[in-house]
């Protein structure tokens, strides 16, 4: 019974933290984000570590709703053009690999969206839109939502859920019928 109580206690902590983080994201910025996605020819994703795992899940979910989605570095990655969007996931905004990719994408004329926590970051110079999830990060800003979870876990969780929330918003805006989306789901199962 003690493990059950401990489990429920941790569930409540995680759910509360994710709720507070996601509700702190600016809805006007989210609308701009969705507009950029809906008007892109292709949407690329770049990040590292656990952030990359969250981005890969978002990439797949967007593919399920008909968005041409690509993870940077995949063997089938096509050429980027000025009609494309690059989504950079980095809580700190100072991660070397995503910064380099963002700079290259900017040179190619793509639109750069940074989803992160720290507004004072190294990607700013090439970012067209910054989606801030104001959670605890390495920068330790006073306006960050503190977390009882280790390191930057709350950012990765919030990022993943942000992808699912924006998917639902796009579905509603485009008036998709959920049953019609199965055509995009993997079928070699």
Image (cartoon, helix red, strand yellow):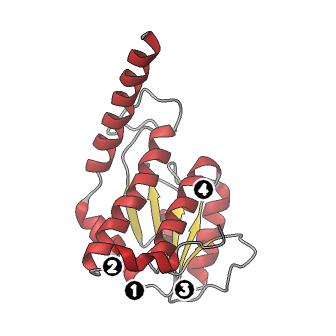
**C-alpha separation, residue under disc 3 versus residue under disc 2:** 18 Å
Relative to 55, does residue 51 appear above or below in the rendering?
above
Among the two numbered marks 1 and 3 on one chain, the one whose residue lies closer to the N terminus: 1
Q: Are marks 1 and 2 in contact (CB under 8 Å)?
A: yes
Q: Residue under circle 1?
A: 39
Number of the front mark, 3 or 4: 4
**C-alpha separation, residue under disc 1 versus residue under disc 4:** 23 Å
**C-alpha separation, residue under disc 1 versus residue under disc 2:** 6 Å
Q: Residue under circle 4?
A: 52
Give me the disc on residue 35.
2
Q: Residue at x 37, y 50 (%)?
A: 133
Q: Quadrant of the C terminus?
A: bottom right
Residue 36 screen position, x and y as percent: 38, 79
Relative to 75, does residue 4 appear above or below in the rendering?
above
| 10 Å crowding of disc 1: few (<14), some (14-19), many (20+) | few
**C-alpha separation, residue under disc 1 versus residue under disc 3:** 15 Å
Q: Are marks 4 and 2 in contact (CB under 8 Å)?
A: no
Among the two numbered marks 3 and 2 on one chain, the one whose residue lies closer to the N terminus: 2
Number of the front mark, 1 or 3: 1
Element class at badge 3? loop
Residue 49 screen position, x and y as percent: 64, 49
Q: Residue at x 60, y 85 (%)?
A: 108
């Amino acid at each position: 019974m003690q493990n059950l109580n401990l489990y429920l206690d941790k569930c409540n902590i995680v759910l509360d933290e994710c709720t507070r983080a996601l509700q702190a994201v600016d809805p006007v910025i989210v609308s701009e984000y969705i507009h950029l996605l809906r008007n892109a020819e292709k949407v690329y994703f770049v990040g590292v570590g656990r952030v990359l795992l969250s981005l890969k899940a978002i990439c797949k979910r967007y593919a399920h709703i008909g968005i041409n989605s690509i993870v940077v570095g995949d063997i089938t990655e096509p050429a980027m053009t000025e009609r494309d969007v690059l989504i950079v996931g980095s809580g700190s905004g100072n991660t070397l690999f995503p910064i380099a990719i963002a700079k290259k994408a900017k040179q190619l004329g793509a639109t750069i969206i940074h989803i992160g926590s720290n507004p004072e970051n190294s990607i700013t110079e090439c970012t067209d839109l910054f989606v801030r999830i104001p959670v605890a990060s390495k920068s330790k800003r006073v306006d960050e939502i503190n977390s009882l979870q280790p390191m930057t876990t709350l950012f990765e969780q919030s990022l993943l859920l942000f992808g699912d929330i924006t998917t639902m918003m796009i579905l509603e805006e485009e008036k998709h019928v959920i049953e019609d989306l199965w055509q995009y789901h993997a079928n070699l199962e």
